[in-house]
Image (tube, rainbow, N blue to C red):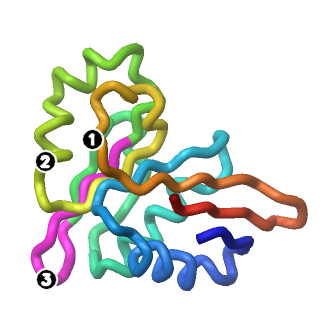
Amino acid sequence: MNKNYSLLNLNQIAKDIIKNSKHKVLLFYGDMGVGKTTLIKEICKELGTDDITSSPTFSIVNEYITSNGDTIYHFDFYRLNNEEEAYNIGVEDYFHTDAWCFIEWPSVIKNLLPLITNNIYLTKLDDDQRNIQLK
């Protein structure tokens, strides 16, 4: 998947990600302010959570429950100094569940990531447009 989008069609992009994801671990790559958290919030909404979704920058991981009882984990590793900090919170245990795992700043913990993931690359374009590539 390779598309340009704006906030006006974020809902459709979220649906496309869910439909086209072959695995439940999604790695979000992109510069600060490109819209990783905003997109993850929309994906969570599409998956059926009524929980208030927010960036886990300070908590490292947020847990959301969908209307059918499924679990979603949302990680933000921006503040970590090294992989050992992620290891100490048991991050690998989260990855080996059947839950959706949305990971911002995955390069911080690259040696702890599962081998099978979906990679999402976000790039800011002109005129409030973004480009998304799902690989």
Residue 51: x and y in percent read 28, 69
9 vs 110: above or below: below
Which of the two discs, 3 and 1, labels the residue nearer the N terminus? 3
Q: Residue at the spot x=25%, y=61% of the render?
A: 100
Q: Amino acid at mark 2?
A: His
Residue 126: x and y in percent read 89, 60
Q: Amino acid at mark 3?
A: Asn
* 93 and 62: which is toward the camera: 93
Element type at mark 3: loop
* 111 and 83: which is toward the camera: 111
What label does residue 68 carry, if any? Answer: 3
The label nearer to you, 2 versus 3, is: 2
Q: Amino acid at mark 1?
A: Pro
Which of the two discs, 1 and 2, labels the residue nearer the N terminus? 2
- Magenta segment boundaries in residue numbering: 65-75
Residue 80: x and y in percent read 39, 22
- Which residue is labeled 2 in the image? 96
* 53 and 46: which is toward the camera: 46
21 vs 57: above or below: below
